[in-house]
Amino acid sequence: DPLRIRAEAIATTINVPEDVRSLEDLENLLAIGYQKTRPGSFFVPAAEIREITLFGKYESALKKALADHTLRVWFQPIWSVRDQCTVSAEALLRVDCDELRDLSPGAYVPVAEKTGLIRQIGLFVFEEVCRFLSEERIRNSSIRYVELNLSAYQFYDDDLVENFETIRKKYGVDSSRINLEITETAAASGEGEVSETLSRFLEKGYTLSLDDFGTGYSNLIRMTGTHYKNIKIDKSILWNISRDGGGRETLVNLIRFVKGLGSEIIQEGVETTEELDLSVSCGCDYIQGYHFGRPVPEDAFVSGLAGDKEEPR
């Protein structure tokens, strides 16, 4: 009989080799160290088996994507309330392979972080952003800078700043045209290392954004000592106010406080005219969301700039 791995708390039986299809899958499963209850049997939650199997699948797909050069960078417009046009973009990772093509990066980026692949991926994204900014069609456009995300795990790389600087200088891009975006979670974790690295980036002329502000990790005291060019208000705040009709004054006061620190406000997740009107009336400086454009490949993004002053896409 095949080895049977019984799921804890549910009446599901996982069979080998029908459900665990390779020796590597089985080794990963056994390595998690569950207590044997009798020869050949382990009690393991079925959900955890699926998670382990999926983790391995995503890791293999990411490694293959790096080897086959199928990583891509897409761009989402950031619209200026004052200038009434797109003045920036956020660079977002996509993977052009069957396993990951239709998934949100939120599904596989954590795998890249835990396996260390985020280092190579982060350098790829940064180089693509520099190449993009160096093109004449972008230098002559309304795009002033591009934002790209830094994972908390990238701060463990002692050579992060030096590697970025080498790539930037290769393309002759001014550092002020690159805005590094970190989440509140990253800013709050390993605070000494993170702060030191961010200070080095600031010394080189890069600017910073704080992403997902208001999601539960907010530390207003810490913010007063950090020089963020932009603060991104998490979309959940806007959506809750739009849905419930309350809390507008809280958002207004929060924006007023942040602007008092010298930062500008980007409202994420704007999808409707009503959400746009609410964001503008509360004092937001920039708008990001499907109302002005979804993330798209580079050529589609540049084509969209031509009709930027017309009705939102």
Image (spheres, grey):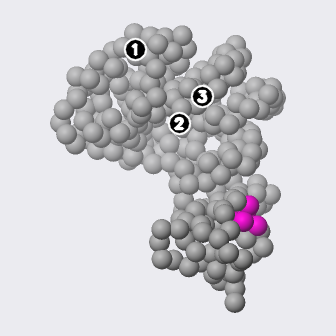
Give the position of the N terminus as an image quadrant.
bottom right
Question: Which marked residue is nearer to the observer: mark 3 or mark 2?
Answer: 3
Query: Residue, x 44% and y 16% (percent of image)?
Result: 220
Question: What's the amino acid at mark 2?
Answer: Ala
Kindly identify which numbered label has been placed on residue 89: 2
Q: Which of 32/56 is in front?
A: 32
The reply to whether residue 307 is in sight is yes
Q: Which of 189/230 is in front?
A: 189
Span colored in magenta = 27-31
Q: How many marks?
A: 3
Question: What's the amino acid at mark 1?
Answer: Lys
The reply to whether residue 176 is in sight is no
Upstream in sequence: badge 3 or badge 1:
3
Kindly identify which numbered label has been placed on residue 259: 1
- Magenta stretch, main secondary structure class: helix
Percent position (x, y) of residue 232? 45, 29
Distance CA(mark 3)–CA(mark 2): 26 Å
Question: What's the amino acid at mark 3?
Answer: Ser
Crowding around mark 2 (Cα neighbors within 10 Å: few <14, some 14 to 19, many 20+) is many
Q: Which of 95/82 is in front?
A: 95
* Contact? badges 2 and 1 (CB < 8 Å): no
Upstream in sequence: badge 2 or badge 1:
2
Distance CA(mark 2)–CA(mark 1): 21 Å
Crowding around mark 3 (Cα neighbors within 10 Å: few <14, some 14 to 19, many 20+) is few
The residue tagged 3 is: 189
Percent position (x, y) of residue 126? 70, 37
